[in-house]
Image: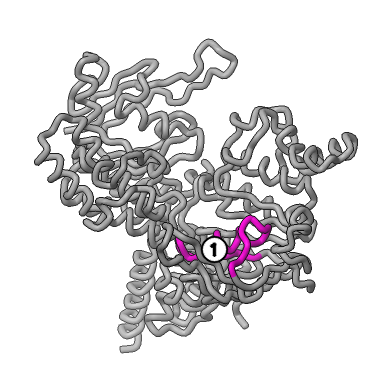
Amino acid sequence: MAVIRTEHLSHVYSEGTPFVKMAIQDVNLSIEEGEMVGVIGHTGSGKSTLIQHLNGLLKPTSGKIYIDGEDMWADKAKLREIRFKVGLVFQYPEYQLFEETVYRDIAFGPKNMGLSEEEVDKRVRQAAAFVNVTEEMMNKSPFELSGGQKRRVAIAGVLAMNPKVLILDEPTAGLDPKGRDRILGQIQEYQQDQKNTVLIVSHSMEDVAKFAKKVLVMNQSKVFMYDDTEKVFEHASEIEQMGLAVPQVTKIFMRLADMGYPVDPHTYTIQAAKQQVLRLFEEQEAKQKKGGM
Amino acid sequence: MNDFIKAQGISFSYHVEEGQQPVSVFEDLDVTIHEGELTAVLGHNGSGKSTFAKHLNAILLPSGGKVYIDGMDTADEEKLYDIRQKVGMVFQNPDNQIVATVVEEDVAFGLENIGVPPKEMRERVDRALMDVGIYEYKKHAPHRLSGGQKQRVAIAGIIAMRPKCIVLDEPTAMLDPRGRREVMETIQKLNREYGITIVLITHYMDEAALCDRIIVMDSGKIILDDTPKKVFSNVRELKTVGLDVPQTSELIYEFLKEGYNLPKDVLTEDECIKAITTLFRRKGIKPAKPEQQTEDCSQEIV
C-alpha cells in the first residue's frame, strides 16, 4: 500500500503579492511502504516545499495528501497523530538541539507522544544505537559534542519517535566524505531493520546512486520523474541540464558509449563500472581463444 | 614567486574547561603559500584546517611559532589593520556574512569602514559586482538571491577591498551543484585574471582538483602537499584519513589494483577516457563505429 500519496498537490507562495510563486504544481505521487527514496532537484525546484507538505508543515493550496491512507487535512484533530507518523529531519538539524543532556534531547519527541517512561527509555537507547551515539555521550551537554556527533544526536531524536516515514533534508551537508558515508550507512541500516519508508533529499547524485532504490526528481515545481534509480539515471543528460551534477563515472561511460565502445552508458557507481569492464575483458579473451583454435 | 603566507612552526591549542588539559589542534606546523597560488586545503572534520585558516588574517594567533602575511607578523597588533586588508575571508554560511538590505550596499560596507571616497567607492563596488557576475542584481535584496548568488555577493564585498589574498572556508558547503559551480568559476577567475592568492578549504574533491596545489591535513599535520594529480594518486592514503578522491582517480585505481598497467595520476575525465580506451585497445576491444572516433582516440596512438 502507498504510505504517501498526493493528488494534484499544488502550493502557491505569497498569493496576491508581486512575489507570487507556484512552488509545486499538480504533484501526483505514490510512495510505497518500505521504499528508500532519493529526492533530487536544484534550489527552487520545489523539493523542500514538497517535503514540508508531507508532515503537514505546509497546507496545500489545492490538492490532497494521504498518509497511510488517511487524508491529512480532512480532520484537524487528527493532524497531530498523522504528524507523528512522518518524521522530518531538517538541514543542519544540530542547530535545533536545546536540552541539557543528549539523553533528554533524544527523549523530547517520544515524551511528547505521551509514551510511558519505560517506552521512552527503550526508544531513546534504540535510536541512539542506530546512529552510534554512545552511552558515554548520553549525559553530556549536546553542545560539548563535535559537529558530526551533534548531527547524529539530532537524527536520533527523530528516529526515537519511530515514524513510519522518515524524511531527511540533506543529512550529509557540510560533512567530510567519511562522515557522509557513515550517516548514510546508518540510515540505510535503520531502514533495513525497521522496514519503514525513508526519503533523503540530496544534491549529490553520487550519494543517491549509492543508497537509493528509487529516485524522485523535482524540476520547475513539478515531478520530472519518480522511478527506479537505474531508470532515472538513463536520463542523465536531461538531469545534468537541470543544473544537477551527474556522477563523473556516468559521464565517462556515456562518452565511451558515444565513441562506439560496447559499454553501458547508464553506469553510475565505480564498482558497476569496474565489473562491467572486467566482464568485457573476459568476453574478449574467450572470443580470442575461440578464434585461435 | 613571493612567499605571501609563511607559517613557521605554529601550534594552537584551546581549553575546553577550566583546569583541564588543553586540546592541541596542531603542533609545529610549517606552511608556505606563494603569491598567486590557488591552494586547496583538505582534511576531515576536526583535522585543524579551519583553525589554520583563521590564523591567516589574525582571527586566531598561534600559541607557538609565527605567521607572516606578506612579511608582517600577525601577532603585531599595529599591523592588524594592514593584514586584514590584504587577506579577506569568506565563510560557509552566506546568510551570516551579509549585513545590508541591498546588494550594492552590502558590497560597499567594507569600503565605507575604511573611508573610501564616494566616487571611488562607486567604481570599486561596480567593478566587484561585475567580477562576480552579479551586477544586474545590485539593487536587489540579498535574501531573495540563491545561495550561490549570496555567496558571490559576500565574495564581491571582499574583492571590493582589493585584497591580495582570499581565504574561503567551505564556501560551497551549503550550495547546490549550480551554486557550487558559480562560486568555483568566480574563484578561478579571480585567481587567473587578478593573480589573487586563494586558499580554499573544502570537503569536495572535485573542487580541490581544480586548484594548483592541495594540502591535506590530518590530526593537525600536513600529510600530503602537492599538485592535484600527485595528491589524488594516493587513493588508499586519502581514504584512510576519511577523505575521498574524484571518481576518475578511483576508477583507474581499481584497475591498477587488478594489476593493469595504467598511469597512476589520472585526474580529468579526458585522461580517464584515454586510459580506459588504451586498455581497451590493448585487449583488442574496438569501437563499433570507428568513423565516430573522437580526437581522444587518435591522439593516444603514440
As drawn, A33 above or below B192: above
Is residue A116 found left or right of A8 in the rendered image?
Answer: left
Percent of width and height locating residue A221: 46, 29
Residue visible at 72% across and 47% down in the picture? B158
- In which quadrant is the N terminus of chain B drawn? bottom right
Q: Which secondary structure is most common in the magenta stretch? A: loop
Q: Does the rendering let one see residue A77?
A: yes
Among the 4 quarters of the image, the one containing residue A8:
top left
State which region is magenta: B39-63
Q: Is residue B272 toward the left or the right of residue B35 in the image?
A: left
Query: Which chain letter goes with mark 1?
Result: B
Q: Taking B163 as reference, is A240 left or right?
A: left
Looking at the image, is A208 positioned above or below residue B198? above
Residue designated by label 1: B49
Q: Is residue A257 visible?
A: no
Front-most of residues A236 and A22: A22
Q: Position of residue A167 (x, y in %)?
A: 31, 39
Q: Nearer the viewer, residue B86 or A6?
A: B86
Q: Nearer the viewer, residue B301 or B58?
A: B58
Find residue A256 and report its horizontal and vertical position in percent: 49, 64
Residue drawn at the location 76% of the way across and 56% of the way down: B86
Alpha-carbon neighbours of circle 1 within 10 Å: few (<14), some, or many (≥20)?
many
**In the image, residue A27 lies in the stretch drawn in magenta:** no
The three-letter amino acid code for the residue at tag 1 is Lys
Magenta stretch: includes residue B59 = yes
